[in-house]
Image (cartoon, helix red, strand yellow):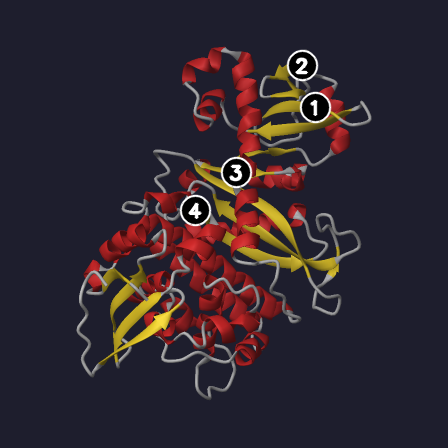
Amino acid sequence: MNKSIIISEKVKQHFTARATLAALGVKLRKRKVFAPVMQKVKIKQKTVKFTPTEKLMDAMIAILAGAHGLVEINKRVRPDRGLQAAFGRAGCAEQSVVQDTLDACNKENVEQMQESLNLIYRRHSQGYRHKYKKAWQLLDADMTGRPCGKKAAFATKGYFAKQRNRRGRQEGYLIATRYEEIVAKQLFDGKTQLTKALRPLVEAAEKTLGLDQDEDKRQRTILRVDSGGGSVDDINWVLQHGYQFHGKDYSGTRAQKLAESVVEWFDDPHSPERQVGWVTAEADIYCRPVKRIAVRCRKNNGQWGVGVLISTLSSSDVLQLTGQPVVKTSDPLAVLLAYVYFYDQRGGGVETEIKEDKQGLGTSKRNKKRFEAQYMLTLLEALAHNILVWARRWLTPLCPKVSQFGMLRLVRDAFHMNGLVVFHQASHVVQIVFNQADPLAEELQSGFAALLAHEQVAVTLGET
């Protein structure tokens, strides 16, 4: 080791396969991130060795450790005394006991968990502290299928990508795109799509972000959705609540008719097979003025596939949002394409976050038969996602490489490094030693040393 360690009889050390995750656990423990869950979630289950909320913490640690199934608690968390100590745990429940705790959850517990996550988000997120007067708050909403067995509660046939006649449930995401944070995440039956899920997702986000009592903030918030949330009723509901809307029309038939009113089509220089044009028909079905852009692409059979974008944003706003100078407002084609490109950016927003959660957190792999148990898992996954996003932000000043990591690389590379955890018998961590042979060890050691300096925890490099 590059620094000598003097270990007294009152100090113990344990090898861990996840020394960097242990270092993160120390920071989370000091910041009391999980405290609202401990205080508010009251699961009616007998305590033998560990409380129900402690078992929920074990499940969350397992998710952060890369477990794609709760059965992996016995392999990834239970034998790792160092990791447990870093998170303030004196032990770890057996996986079947954790499963029983999830199965004991009811609707009230789900509501308690949602309230707890709201408090956690307000205390630690950037999205809640967004400066609305300086920049737009951008919220992306989308749905993703979560296939499961046909005997699971609310498992119905619905849309599951590339899986015909599959049963499952649907998860709704609402992301603060600028910060890559999950503001709201909800679970629905397999038939529910965004046309029914948009309003409850937005209402949940209002409570989390404090938008329900602040009209000025709602006017500086953009809701960006695909066609699933583009029905006339949904758009008018969004507009009546004072939000800005940028999304796709739900009706394919209406889109075809509106496209016929386009006077001139323009080729998209970035996508030669795509053409765009202004819709000139009256937009009298909406309660506020909107701009509409028709977009068409040539299909394999030679016919045109047509969609219509609907937006309340001004020309100057959409140019700024796509990183272009405002002077281009005098260029009709540049403005037209800006509206289209801003919608295209959904691919790098909510769609990317959903994909990263599936890859890095294994969100498509964990399924519970009881609906409330699955909902609790869904909320734990949302918390794990946000924790990793916040950890990346905390480390970025001294670990710039980490700023480019998605969920998969954060779990697999950044927070999966072997080392030693040195702690007093009272489970107070005093030192964490990273394996210096790891390619990320030196950079992460600098970041965690600064992050944990105020916690009086030394972070060093050594051979393990």
Label whose residue precedes the other's in the sequence (1 or 2):
2
The type of residue carrying mark 1 is: Arg
Task: Give the residue pinned by disc 2.
Answer: 265
Which of disc 2 and disc 3 is earlier in sequence? Answer: 2
> Which quarter of the figure is the N terminus placed in?
bottom left
The mark nearer the N terminus, 4 or 2, is 2
| Along the viewing direction, whichever of 211 and 17 lies nearer the viewer | 17
Q: Which mark is residue 405?
A: 4
How far apart marks 4 and 3 lie (CA) works out to: 14 Å
Q: Is residue 85 visible?
A: yes
Compare marks 1 and 4 and give the one earlier in the sequence: 1
Q: Which amino acid, by three-letter code, is at mark 2?
A: Trp
Q: CA distance from mark 1 to mark 3?
A: 21 Å
Residue in the foreground of this view, choosing between 436 and 346: 436
The residue wearing badge 3 is 348
Q: Earlier in the sequence, mark 4 or mark 3?
A: 3
Residue matched to label 1: 296
Q: Is residue 291 left or right of residue 207?
A: right
Name of the residue lying farthest toward the bottom = 48
Note whether 222 is above or below 32 in the view shown.
above
For marks 3 and 2, give the one nearer the viewer. Answer: 3
Quarter containing the C terminus: bottom left
Residue at image position (28%, 66%) is 432
